[in-house]
Structure formats: structure tokens, C-alpha cells
Amino acid sequence: MCYVKEPIRGFYLDKINKNKKIERNARAEDDAAISKKNFIKASLDNVRNLYNIPTARYILIASFLKNFGGMIVSSFLPIFFGSNFP
């Protein structure tokens, strides 16, 4: 890790792909400037994009259910055992 350096990004791209990458970066910078002005709209757009990906959507739903189950166990189990086994 100390001796091997990361190559310069885009060094091995041909001219067409370099131009596409430059255009993409310019669009991303424009989108970033717009999102700074309207943070709520940009956040909602990002969440909408996240839910359009099925794998990400299923992971978010599963993590919600796992955390919800953990909350139920940690909140109500001591009350249940305390009332049933004094």
C-alpha cells in the first residue's frame, strides 16, 4: 500500500471517453450547484433514486424490520418477564 501508487484517473481512456467523462463531470458540478440551492428537493430526488434500485429498496426494508424487531425485544421483553416472573 505504501509502495504502489494509484494511477492517474483517466490516463488510459481514449479521447472519446475522456470527453464524455469531462461532460459528465461538468453536469455533476452543475447539479451540485443546483442542489446547494434547493437541499430538500435534492435530498428527495436522491431518496427516489435509491428506491428505484430494487436491491437497495429491499436492504432498506429489511434493515427497518430488523431494527424494529430489536426495539420490540429490548423495550417489551423486560416488562413481560418482570410481570410474569416476579
Image (spheres, rainbow, N blue to C red):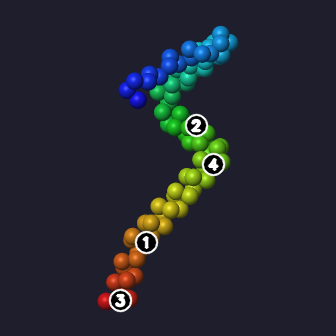
Query: What is the number of the mark on residue 45?
Result: 2
Query: What is the number of the mark on residue 85?
Result: 3
Q: Find the distance from the CA under tag 1 to the CA under tag 2.
A: 34 Å
Q: Find the distance from the CA under tag 3 to the CA under tag 1.
A: 17 Å
Q: Residue at x 59, y 47 (%)?
A: 56
For marks 2 and 3, the one nearer the N-term is 2
Q: Secondary structure at mark 2?
A: helix
Work out whether residue 11 or residue 5 is closer to the camera in this orientation and state it. 5
Q: Which quadrant is the C terminus positioned in?
A: bottom left
Work out whether residue 22 or residue 5 is closer to the camera in this orientation and state it. 5
- At label 2, the amino acid type is Asp
Counting other residues with Cα less than 10 Å from the Cα at mark 3, is it few (<14), some (14-19), or many (20 or more)? few
Instruction: State left or right for residue 66 relative to residue 56.
Output: left
- At label 3, the amino acid type is Phe
Q: Which quadrant is the N terminus positioned in?
A: top left
Q: Find the distance from the CA under tag 3 to the CA under tag 4.
A: 43 Å
- At label 1, the amino acid type is Val
Q: Position of residue 32 (x, y in %)?
A: 51, 25
For marks 4 and 2, the one nearer the N-term is 2
Q: Which residue is mark 1?
A: 73
Contact flag, marks 3 and 1 (Cβ < 8 Å): no
Q: Residue at x 47, y 61 (%)?
A: 67
Q: Find the distance from the CA under tag 1 to the CA under tag 4.
A: 27 Å
For this orientation, the residue located farthest to the front is: 3
Q: Position of residue 35 (x, y in %)?
A: 51, 28
Q: Residue at x 57, y 17 (%)?
A: 10
In the image, is residue 79 above or below residue 30?
Answer: below
